[in-house]
């Protein structure tokens, strides 16, 4: 619970660096050892009778504290373990990752954590500028409390899953040194602050490289648990970067991981995909294991159309 002795904005526990040269990357950011406290920690999620349970996929959803309705939708759909067919490799567990916010919203988070036991919340401020910390929080939790899962799927709360395609995609994949998602290669750094992409502007002084390293689009990707643990330990020794997916890409590059692209991931807002006919829209979605950047309404439609019947 949030109380008067626990400020909503945690004290920074940072190792300051004015300028860091890190294997080709110049970053004017501190290193964050990510020593934050848990407000909510469902540490027994991946346990059964004090022993590790079989977990095939651990789904970690980064969610803003205000997005209560999206979390409820996910709990009704892929977030229910019972909504997945039995798999001898283990269960599919879903948790939500969040930082802290104002008192009124915190009361909602406290209630959800009590009712559902699926909230991981650390005491950093939940904001757009802290998405990197939120992703590191997800990797930290998986490494400490669910290291035995085969795969960890990190996704946003505006993503819907096509169960059969996702399970098929991972069916024969190795549970070691595995990564997949939408891979971005040779993406140029935005240098014009007044352009339509000015939101992602970075100065040459801040980041002199002209292109980003290869990275997995942050809306959704899958890593084997060994890579999640390795990325976490690398992240707490790497200067922070404002874009969380690029930051994870920097960590993976330091680990010499070659990213595996796959065509089963779709971001609706970044392609000419949206049509006014719901039936056609959902029909187009059937070709993908993951569809991101969609409304709760379309998430419900997609789930209803492609869910696996388990009863």
Image: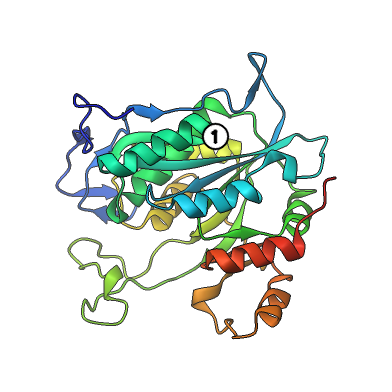
Residue at (63, 62) in percent of width and height: 300
- Residue depicted at 74% across the width and 40% down the height: 82
Query: Dot 1 surroundings within 10 Å: few (below 14), some, or many (20 or more)?
Result: few
Relative to 300, is 277 above or below?
A: below
How does the figure colour the protein chain or chains? rainbow
Residue extending furthest toward the top: 50
Q: Quadrant of the C terminus?
A: top right
Specify the quadrant of the image occupied by residue 232: top left
Q: Is residue 281 left or right of residue 156?
A: right
Q: Secondary structure at mark 1?
A: helix
Depth check: 117 or 265 in front? Answer: 117
Percent x, y for residue 303?
A: 69, 60
Q: Is residue 119 above or below residue 204?
A: above
Where is the N terminus found, in terms of image quarters? top left
207 or 201: which is nearer to us?
A: 201
What x and y, as percent, mark residue 271?
54, 80
Instruction: Quadrant for residue 264, please give it.
Output: bottom right
Regarding residue 289, the answer to whether it shows in the image is no
Q: Which residue is mark 1?
A: 116
Which residue of the protein is positioned furthest toward the right in this rendering? 311
Instruction: From the viewer's perspective, tell me whether residue 270 is left or right of residue 65.
Output: right
Residue 251 appears in the rendering = yes
In the image, 87: left or right of 116? Answer: right
Q: Quadrant of residue 304?
A: bottom right
- Which percent across, then down, holds residue 253? 46, 51
Q: Is residue 124 left or right of residue 178?
A: left
Residue 45 placement (x, y as % from top left): 59, 28
Instruction: Tally the marks.
Output: 1
Q: Residue at x 65, y 84 (%)?
A: 277
């Amino acid at each position: 619970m949030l109380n008067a002795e626990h400020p909503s904005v945690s004290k920074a526990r940072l190792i300051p660096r004015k300028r860091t040269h890190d294997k080709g990357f110049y970053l004017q950011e501190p290193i964050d050892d990510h020593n934050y406290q848990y407000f909510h920690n469902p540490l027994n999620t991946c346990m059964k009778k004090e022993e590790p349970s079989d977990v095939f996929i651990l789904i970690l959803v980064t969610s803003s504290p205000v997005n209560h309705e999206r979390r409820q939708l996910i709990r009704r759909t892929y977030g229910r373990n019972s909504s997945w067919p039995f798999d001898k490799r283990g269960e599919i567990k879903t948790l939500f990752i969040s930082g802290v916010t104002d008192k009124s919203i915190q009361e909602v988070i406290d209630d959800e954590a009590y009712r559902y036991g699926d909230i991981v919340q650390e005491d950093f401020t939940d904001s757009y500028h802290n998405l990197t910390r939120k992703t590191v929080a997800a990797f930290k939790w998986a490494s400490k409390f669910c290291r035995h899962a085969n795969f960890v799927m990190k996704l946003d709360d505006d993503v819907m899953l096509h169960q059969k395609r996702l399970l098929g995609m991972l069916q024969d994949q190795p549970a070691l040194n595995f990564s997949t998602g939408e891979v971005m290669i040779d993406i140029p750094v935005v240098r014009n602050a007044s352009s339509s992409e000015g939101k992602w502007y970075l100065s040459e002084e801040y980041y002199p490289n002209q292109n980003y390293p290869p990275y997995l689009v942050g809306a959704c990707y899958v890593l084997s648990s060994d890579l999640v643990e390795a990325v976490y330990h690398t992240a707490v020794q790497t200067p922070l970067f404002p874009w969380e997916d690029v930051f994870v890409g920097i960590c993976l590059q330091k680990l010499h991981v070659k990213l595996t692209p796959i065509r089963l991931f779709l971001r609706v807002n970044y392609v000419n995909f949206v049509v006014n006919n719901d039936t056609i829209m959902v029909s187009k979605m059937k070709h993908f294991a993951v569809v991101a950047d969609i409304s709760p309404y379309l998430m419900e439609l997609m789930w209803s159309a492609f869910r696996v019947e388990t009863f």
